[in-house]
Image: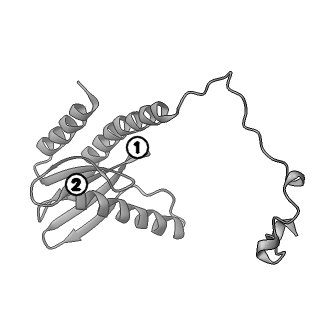
Amino acid sequence: MDADAAIRAELYRLRRRLPDLSGAVLGGVDGLLIAADLTDADPHHLAALAAATLGLGHRFAQSAGHGPLHESVVRSAGGCVITYPAGAYGLLTLVTYPDSDVERIHPEARASAHRLGTMVDSLRVAASVAAVPATDPDAPLDVRTPMAALPADLWAETGGLRPPGLR
């Protein structure tokens, strides 16, 4: 099974194990959508808001001296929106129905966020390794012109003013 199918399958299983959920969204910490099992809202919008919300929650926790953030819970009249970190690069956001038992959701959701985070992190690492171009070990090094070899009137255009470190 490829990584995208594994992520979608995990979101599907999570929704089936927790009937209180009306949707699940996996987004990146950059706010971009990775996968979703959601019908009542725009998953792209939710992924972006989740990144912003978790960023603010992280700052609140740091400012209060409470250590790392575990999750962010937004309660409203229509239910809850709960966001969990999923590894270093992912965010799992769950949307619940009104009167859902959030304490019952947390253990299963945290375990799922851990599994999804492992998948997202491995994809991110694989993509970053593939994006680094291979260098030719026999290629000549670039040659830089020493400052002493620059023309004496180089700074004449600025009235003789040089950047602070070169005066």
Query: What percent of the width, then of the height, locates residue 7?
Result: 25, 37
Q: Residue 2 carries which label?
A: none
Disc 2 designates what residue? 94
Q: Looking at the image, which is closer to me, 120 or 149?
A: 149
- The quadrant holding residue 45 is bottom left
Mark 1: amino acid:
Gly
Query: What percent of the width, then of the height, locates residue 27?
Result: 30, 50
Disc 1 designates what residue? 87
- 77 displayed left or right of 149: left
Residue at the spot x=9%, y=54% of the render?
39
Residue at the spot x=39%, y=53% of the render?
29
Tell me the crowding category of disc 1: few under 14, some 14 to 19, or many 20 or more residues within 10 angstroms, Cα based: many
Q: Of helix, strand and loop, which one carries label 1? A: loop
Q: Distance between the residues labelled 2 and 1?
A: 16 Å
Residue at the spot x=25%, y=27% of the render?
2
- 77 displayed left or right of 160: left
